[in-house]
């Protein structure tokens, strides 16, 4: 994809189309289960939970497709496959954030 379908901006980045809250919930649940099982002296089960969460995380990483996101408006474009867009760059995002701040100050 060469330009955003919503605003026409040419600077886009790709990221995994997986909800961050779900990934953090899986990680937090695995850590809590690990601590609880260790408290009951069930170390084998505790490590099994951590390893299982790592396997689930790896499978989800491979199964979830990329999403192309616009730096300017944040529109997400799904189902584009290998679009050739680069990963997120903080410097580009900061430039657009500063642009939004200047636009709000001028109002």
Image (cartoon, grey):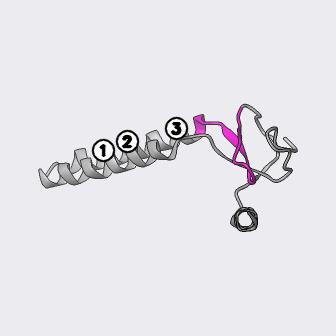
Q: Counting residues from the N terminus, which is met first, the one under dot 3 or under dot 2?
A: 2
Residue 37: percent from the left, percent from the top?
A: 19, 48
Q: What range is drawn magenta here?
A: 62-78
Disc ID at residue 52:
2
Horizontal side of 18 relative to 72 (left or right) equals left
Mark 1: few, some, or many residues within 10 Å (few <14, many ≥20)?
A: few
Residue 64 lies left or right of residue 88; in this view the side is: left
Residue at the image point whose x is 86% and y is 50% from the top? 10
Percent coordinates x, y for residue 81 in the rendering: 76, 35
What is the crowding at mark 3: few (fewer than 14 residues within 10 Å), some, or many (at least 20)?
A: few
Magenta highlight on residue 23: no
Question: Does any portion of residue 73 appear in the rendered image?
Answer: yes
Residue 48, label in figure: 1
Q: Residue at coordinates 45% horizontally, 42% vertically from top-left?
A: 22
Sequence-first tag of 3 and 1: 1
Q: Position of residue 100 (x, y in %)?
A: 72, 61
Do labels 2 and 1 touch, CB within 8 Å? yes
The secondary element bearing badge 1 is classed as: helix
Real-space CA distance between mark 3 and mark 2, rounded to the nearest whole angstrom: 11 Å
User: Circle 3 sits in a helix, a strand or a loop, which is it?
Assistant: helix
Identify the residue under disc 3.
59
How many numbered tags mark residues here? Answer: 3
**Quadrant in the rendering for residue 45:** top left
User: Disc 3 or disc 1, which is closer to the eye?
Assistant: 3
Could you say which is closer to the camera, residue 28 or residue 44?
A: 28
């Amino acid at each position: 994809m060469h330009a955003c379908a919503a605003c026409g901006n040419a600077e886009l980045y790709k990221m995994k189309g997986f909800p961050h809250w779900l990934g953090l919930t899986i990680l937090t649940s695995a850590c809590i289960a690990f601590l609880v099982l260790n408290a009951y002296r069930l170390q084998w089960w505790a490590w099994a939970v951590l390893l299982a969460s790592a396997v689930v995380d790896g499978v989800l990483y491979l199964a979830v497709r990329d999403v192309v996101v616009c730096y300017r408006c944040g529109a997400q474009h799904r189902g584009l496959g290998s679009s050739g867009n680069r990963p997120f760059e903080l410097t580009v995002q900061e430039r657009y954030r500063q642009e939004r701040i200047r636009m709000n100050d001028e109002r």
